[in-house]
Image (tube, rainbow, N blue to C red):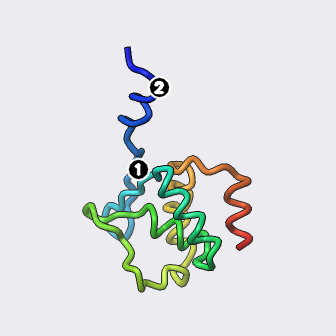
């Protein structure tokens, strides 16, 4: 029988594949540390949507966005499916999203 501790440390981060511009982007959920880092980035002026896209989107196993990419200028109709999947996979509550969107 597995303990709660074993269960937690053996758990994997959920993923979802989304087609974007003819390629498959993998949206990954976050670890506890990753969620803290996302919240810190959003609170420090990166903007919530840009921060969550940077933290969760991968192409061929590598981050989709580079550090100097201006993710905030991508048209939102192109990123909304990615953002919504990221919020769901990161198990973010509506209250957390609202709080981070205010910053």
Q: Is residue 26 above or below residue 72?
A: above
Q: Which mark is residue 4?
A: 2
Who's the residue at 61% across and 71% down the image?
42
- The quadrant holding residue 72 is bottom right
Whichever of callouts 1 and 2 sits on the residue coming sooner in the sequence is: 2
Q: Which one is closest to the eye, mark 1 or mark 2?
A: 2
- The quadrant holding residue 12 is top left
Element under label 1?
strand
Residue 41 % position (x, y): 56, 71
Who's the residue at 61% across and 75% down the image?
47
Residue 48 % position (x, y): 61, 69
Who's the residue at 51% across and 54% down the image?
85
Residue 27 % position (x, y): 41, 57
**With 43 as the anchor, is 74 left or right in this view?**
left
**With 66 as the anchor, is 99 left or right in this view?**
right
Residue closest to the eye, 85 or 22 = 85
- Quick one: which residue is furthest to the left in this view? 60
Residue 30 % position (x, y): 47, 53
């Amino acid at each position: 029988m597995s303990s709660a501790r074993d269960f937690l440390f053996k758990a994997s981060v959920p993923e979802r594949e989304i087609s974007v511009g003819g390629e498959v982007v993998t949206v990954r959920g976050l670890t506890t540390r990753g969620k803290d880092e996302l919240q810190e980035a959003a609170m420090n002026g990166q903007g919530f949507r840009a921060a969550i896209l940077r933290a969760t989107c991968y192409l061929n196993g590598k981050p989709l966005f580079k550090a100097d990419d201006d993710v905030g200028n991508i048209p939102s109709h192109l990123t909304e499916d990615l953002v919504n999947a990221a919020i769901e996979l990161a198990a973010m509550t509506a209250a957390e999203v609202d709080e981070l969107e205010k910053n």
